[in-house]
Image (spheres, rainbow, N blue to C red):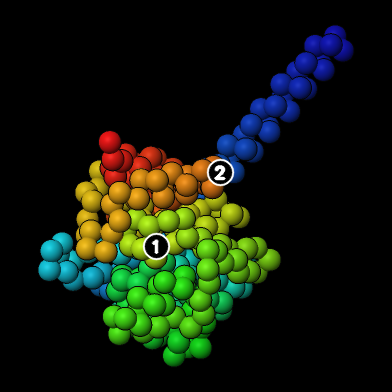
């Protein structure tokens, strides 16, 4: 009788633990938390938000362009600006008034307008900017707004009591593309180095196509625990985006 009661207790405890774990897994669902004509913000994990703005191009039409906000405590760090200062103003205002957070830093992941087109607004709010040293060189050459602080190889910053990293793995979409990572949420901002599933190769005017696949292979090896991957354009997903990009640019 005691054995039966003990076995029943173990089964009941297992069911309770399984149910709690299941409820925890189901407790978060990605959702749009802000939407206007120029900016969309989507919460993709408990402490991370994708921001999407739009860039009118000659070859690809009105292109949605992604960035990432990561949050811990009352602090945030942003990867890539919206495409213009108006979008950046809206993003900064939403973070301050809705999240009730300060912005510790803005990190453009390469020198194109879809990464730093709204940089002036951040500087106007006295938000420091950080970029790979080649991004700063290319921004200067193209007469864009220049990020304030440079780094070589990699950068680590604190957001609350967590860390955020940006790292250069090699050339691909551009000669300066870096990847952002927020270990607390296992989330990666791949920027334009990473393609959404079924995407084409896109703009190649500043690309190193022969190096692209190998660069992304290094990214995949560096972050085996990544769960969410946000590309520069299109839908976010998981590490399958890395595999897709590797295959898309693989040379025989």
Q: Where is residue 155 in the image (x, y as percent from the top left)?
A: 56, 67
Q: Residue at x 38, y 68 (%)?
A: 110
Number of callouts: 2
Q: Quarter holding the N terminus? A: top right
- Label 1 Cα neighbours within 10 Å, binned few <14 / some 14-19 / many ≥20: many
Near-viewer residue (180 or 211):
211
Q: Is mark 1 on a helix, strand or loop?
A: loop
Q: Quarter holding the C terminus? A: top left
In which quarter of the view is residue 101 placed? bottom right
Near-viewer residue (93 or 193):
193
Q: Where is residue 24 in the image (x, y as percent from the top left)?
A: 59, 43
Q: Can residue 150 be seen in this view?
A: yes
In which quarter of the view is residue 22 placed? top right
Q: Name the residue under label 1.
A: 177
Q: Where is residue 243 in the image (x, y as percent from the top left)?
A: 38, 40
Q: Name the residue under label 2.
A: 225
Q: Residue 25 carries which label?
A: none
Q: Residue at x 51, y 60 (%)?
A: 167
Near-viewer residue (54 or 246):
246
Q: Residue at x 47, y 60 (%)?
A: 168
**Residue 71 located left or right of residue 248:** right
Is tag 2's residue or tag 1's residue first in the polypeptide sequence? 1
- Label 2 Cα neighbours within 10 Å, binned few <14 / some 14-19 / many ≥20: few
In which quarter of the view is residue 73 placed? bottom right
């Amino acid at each position: 009788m005691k054995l039966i009661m003990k076995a029943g207790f173990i089964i009941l405890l297992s069911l309770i633990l399984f149910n709690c774990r299941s409820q925890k897994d189901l407790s978060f669902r990605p959702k749009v938390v802000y939407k206007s004509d120029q900016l969309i913000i989507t919460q993709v994990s408990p402490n991370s938000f994708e921001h999407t703005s739009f860039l009118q191009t000659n070859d690809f039409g009105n292109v949605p362009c992604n960035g990432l906000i990561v949050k811990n405590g009352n602090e945030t760090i942003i990867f890539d600006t919206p495409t213009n200062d108006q979008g950046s103003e809206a993003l900064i205002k939403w973070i301050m008034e809705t999240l009730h957070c300060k912005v510790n830093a803005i990190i453009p992941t390469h020198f194109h307008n879809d990464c730093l087109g709204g940089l002036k607004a951040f500087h106007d709010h006295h938000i420091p900017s950080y970029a790979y040293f080649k991004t700063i060189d290319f921004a200067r050459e193209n007469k864009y707004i220049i990020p304030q602080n440079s780094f070589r190889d990699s950068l680590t910053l604190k957001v609350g009591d967590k860390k955020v990293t940006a790292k250069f793995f090699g050339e691909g979409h551009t000669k300066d593309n870096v990847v952002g990572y927020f270990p607390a949420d296992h989330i990666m901002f791949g920027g334009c180095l990473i393609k959404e599933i079924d995407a084409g190769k896109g703009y190649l005017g500043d690309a190193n196509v022969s190096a692209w696949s190998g660069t992304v292979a290094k990214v995949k090896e560096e972050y085996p625990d990544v769960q969410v991957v946000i590309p520069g354009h299109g839908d976010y997903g998981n590490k399958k985006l890395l595999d897709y990009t590797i295959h898309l640019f693989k040379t025989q």
